[in-house]
Image (cartoon, rainbow, N blue to C red):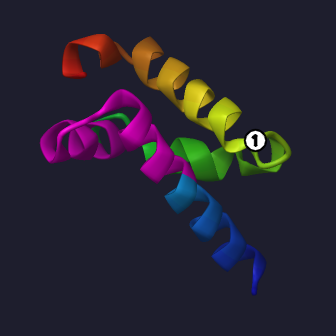
Amino acid sequence: MSKNQSIATWAAFVLSKFRKKYKLSESDFAKAINEYKAVSFLIGNYELLHYYDFDFAVDDLGKYIAEQGWSLNAAA
């Protein structure tokens, strides 16, 4: 598996766990990953975040999106 494939697979797992943790609807999930550039955040921070477990990465993504102005609690 190439490095790019590894990063994409890791990001997909994080996004899946993110949606499950926050119980996001399809529309709220789409908003999070599109409007708040969640995929770009994960790929850009892969070198740091992939050393930690998925829960840490999910929490970090949640913090990043909250810093961008979206209330995750309102979506849940």
**Nearer the observer, 46 or 9:** 9
Image coords of residue 52 (percent x, y)? 81, 39
- Residue 48 position (above or below residue 10): above
Q: Main secondary structure of the magenta part?
A: helix
Q: Is residue 25 left or right of residue 8?
A: left
- Residue at which label 1 appears: 53
Which residue range is magenta in the image? 14-34
Residue 71 visible somewhere in the drawing: no
Quadrant assignment, res 21: top left
Residue type of the residue flagged with mark 1: Asp
**Quadrant the N terminus occupies:** bottom right
x, y percent for residue 13: 55, 57
Q: Going by the image, does 64 lie left or right of 66?
A: right
Q: Secondary structure at mark 1?
A: loop
Quick check: is 51 in the magenta stretch?
Answer: no
Give the residue drawn at x 43%, y 24%.
65
How far across and how far down the image is residue 35, in percent?
28, 38
Measured as percent of width and height from the top left, residue 33 is found at 35, 45
* Residue at the limit of the structure toward the left, as seen here: 27
Q: Is residue 73 left or right of residue 26?
A: right
Count of marks overlaid on the render = 1
Between 61 and 76, the one lying in front of the other is 76
Image side of residue 2 versus residue 31, left or right: right
Please tell me which residue is depicted at 31% across the width and 37% down the height of the picture: 32
